[in-house]
Amino acid sequence: MTDNSYINWVSMSDKALAEQIGAYVRHRRLEQNKSQETLAQAAGISRSTLSLLERGETVTLATLLQVMRVLDQLHIMDAFVVPKTISPLVLARMEQEKRQRASGKKKK
């Protein structure tokens, strides 16, 4: 794979994006010294389906996930994590409900 410091993903066609994903999968497979047959078998898909993926052809999302799991590349899913946020109104309401001072009463 080439080392691009910046790739304009937005300007790429869907076909070009699929080819980039396929190149990534192929690169990782070869890096791990796995044959297409070995990887396909471990992922529960056919070798021809893996070949389609590596060439940037249409495959299902489930197929891509199975292959990424076998290649131990699911950390890429971190890009899809949606952070939990609190609206400013809810945060302000929570701040108002906080205790401002101790009551000073002792419990028996």
Image: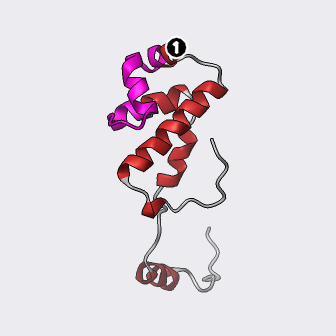
Q: Tell which of 21 and 91 is nearer to you.
A: 21
Q: Nearer the viewer, residue 73 or 103?
A: 73
Rendering quarter of residue 24: top right
Colouring scheme, one of rainbow, by chain, secondary structure, one colour: secondary structure
Task: Give how far across and how far down residue 17 sits, in percent.
Answer: 43, 49
Is residue 2 among the parts visible in the rendering?
yes
**Residue depicted at x 64% and y 46%:** 2
Q: Is residue 102 left or right of residue 95?
A: right
Q: Which residues are magenta?
A: 40-64
Residue 1 vertical placement versus 108 (above, below): above
Q: Secondary structure at mark 1?
A: helix
Relative to 85, say whether 66 is above or below: above
Secondary structure mostly seen in the magenta stretch: helix
Q: Position of residue 91 (x, y in %)?
A: 48, 79
The answer, for residue 72, to whether it is visible in the render is no
Q: Kindly identify the residue that appears in the image at 47 percent across and 53 percent down.
A: 80
Kindly identify which residue carries mark 1: 38
Q: Nearer the viewer, residue 10 or 44?
A: 10
Q: Residues within 10 Å of mark 1 (few under 14, many from 20)?
A: few
Instruction: Classify 68 as above or below 1.
Output: above
Which residue type carries mark 1?
Answer: Thr
Q: Position of residue 108 (x, y in %)?
A: 62, 67
In the rendered image, the quadrant that contains the N terminus is: top right
Given residues 79 and 19, the one toward you in this image is 19
Q: Residue at x 32, y 35 (%)?
A: 60
Task: Reply yes or no: does residue 53 show up in magenta.
Answer: yes
Residue 26 location (% of width, % of height): 54, 31
Queried whether the magenta region covers residue 56, the answer comes back as yes
